[in-house]
Amino acid sequence: MKIKVCGMKYPDNIKELSKLPVHFMGMIFYGKSPRHADELKMDNINVLSSFTKRVGVFVDADIDVIMEMVNKYNLDLVQLHGKETVEFCKELNKTMPVIKAFNISEAADFEQTKLYEDACNYFLFDTKTLQHGGSGQKFDWDILIAYKGNTLFFLSGGISPEDADRIKEIQHPKLYGIDLNSRFETAPGLKNIESIEQFINDLTV
């Protein structure tokens, strides 16, 4: 089970996170997000080892803007949280691995993923809200059984420190990793490192 921690923006917090076995760290490049990582510098994220992949999160951004951030922060993957088209994902995927986020509230919402099967490396299933992620709300994980696609996915949306046992019960063959965000924060973008460490330990017991 891969661990992704998203919405990182504070240098000292990133330095602390770098000591944990986290597979992916997400930085949000969306101006309306309270977790916008607009002030990060390369020195702030160079503390990460090669074990932790750098993910840039975007919402309906132009490819030129995305690639500027890819080059600036040496990103390993790009995560798209807007209404990006299949063609857009395919074009970006020529140069970067792509995670496409989908808003989920009922089993029928998985239908939209079918068109993107050959356009993305991973999917991310988040709770359908008016926000672009970070809502702290869960969808019904029992409906994951309705996802019959071939693309591996991250589970997101309101995952909390108390959910380790419940996540271990999910047996979906395409569940690749989990995405931790707002329920592990003391403030937007500021993660409780001890809580994340305990969660990882609970998940691997």
Image (cartoon, grey):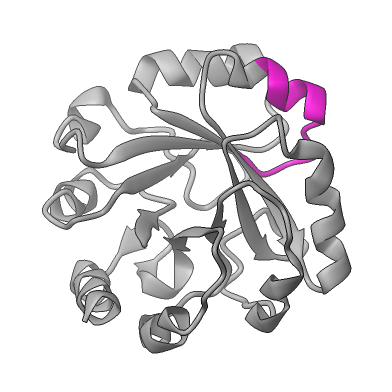
Q: Residue at x 82, y 74 (%)?
A: 106
| 158 w.r.t. 11: above or below | below
Q: Is residue 22 magenta?
A: no
x and y, in percent, of residue 162 in the image = 38, 88
| 115 w.r.t. 74: above or below | below
Q: Quadrant of residue 41?
A: top left
Residue 179 left/right relative to 192: right
Q: Residue at x 32, y 37 (%)?
A: 53
Q: Residue at x 43, y 51 (%)?
A: 7
x and y, in percent, of residue 17 in the image = 20, 54
Q: Quadrant of residue 143?
A: bottom right
x and y, in percent, of residue 85 in the image = 82, 30
Residue 172 left/right relative to 47: right
Which region of the structure is painted magenta? Answer: 80-91
x and y, in percent, of residue 151 in the image = 62, 46
Q: Residue at x 18, y 29 (%)?
A: 46
